[in-house]
Amino acid sequence: MSKFNYYCLLVLFLVSTLGFSQQETSKWKAIFAVGLNSPSQSGLIEPFEAKGANFPTINLGVQHMFKPKLGVKVDFGYNRFSNADNTLDFKVNYTRINAQFVYDTAGDFTFLPIEMGIMLHAGPGYTMIKPLDIYRENTNSYLNAMAGIELHYGISRTVSLFVDGSYILGFAKEFDPVIDGAGSFNGNMLNVTVGASISLSGCRTCN
């Protein structure tokens, strides 16, 4: 075998190995993010009013890509929001769990640097509302649908940082009687978070 043929085989082997490794590192990922939330005012009865931006929002999830561009994830979200200044005091714990489809737009936006990528996600879930303090008996729960977009920046082959903007549409009934809505919530939610996506599969020793 000539040196030229040997080098060609070596390059082919390295390229195929790198491609397989990258695909494997994307197959299973753990996701963690923190940020802010903004509840819709329509989900509160008068005279309750929430702050426009509230902290914290915490999201935890596991993602599985069963095709290079298509996958699923299951994630849990915790949100805390409270009253705006000079309004009735209240605090609400908003938790959710969602199962979502994930679409990796890699290759669709050629103007992005190679380290950057955009992920789209959407799917159904379940929301649980727990008011605090004197309104803690006015719990509520309902189905939801969530959709969002993530902008990722890869810092290694196994870790990427991202910014996520998501909207959660709540399918809740009107409070009946209305007093059940005192200090509670039955509306929609906007989340803006920053986080990290960490590979759980493949390439365990690479940086």
Image (tube, rainbow, N blue to C red):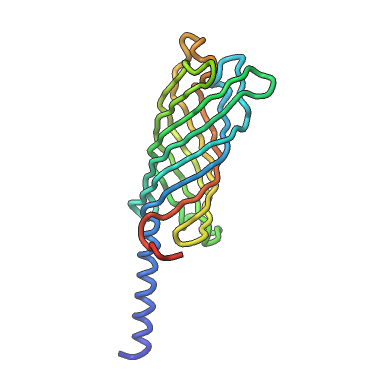
The answer to whether residue 66 is left or right of residue 37 is left
Q: Residue at x 42, y 23 (%)?
A: 141
x and y percent of residue 116 in the render?
53, 57
Q: Nearer the viewer, residue 12 or 63?
A: 63
Vertical arrangement, residue 58 with respect to residue 115, above or below: above
For this orientation, the residue located farthest to the bottom is 2
Vertical arrangement, residue 125 with respect to residue 156, above or below: above
x and y percent of residue 113 in the render?
55, 61
The answer to whether residue 17 is left or right of residue 185 is left
Q: Residue at x 43, y 29 (%)?
A: 144
For this orientation, the residue located farthest to the left is 1
For this orientation, the residue located farthest to the front is 133
x and y percent of residue 33 in the render?
51, 44
Vertical arrangement, residue 118 with respect to residue 19, above or below: above
Q: Nearer the viewer, residue 173 or 94?
A: 94
Q: Residue at x 47, y 49 (%)?
A: 119
x and y percent of residue 60 in the render?
45, 42
Q: Quadrant of the N terminus?
A: bottom left
Q: How many marks?
A: 0
Q: Residue at x 55, y 42 (%)?
A: 193
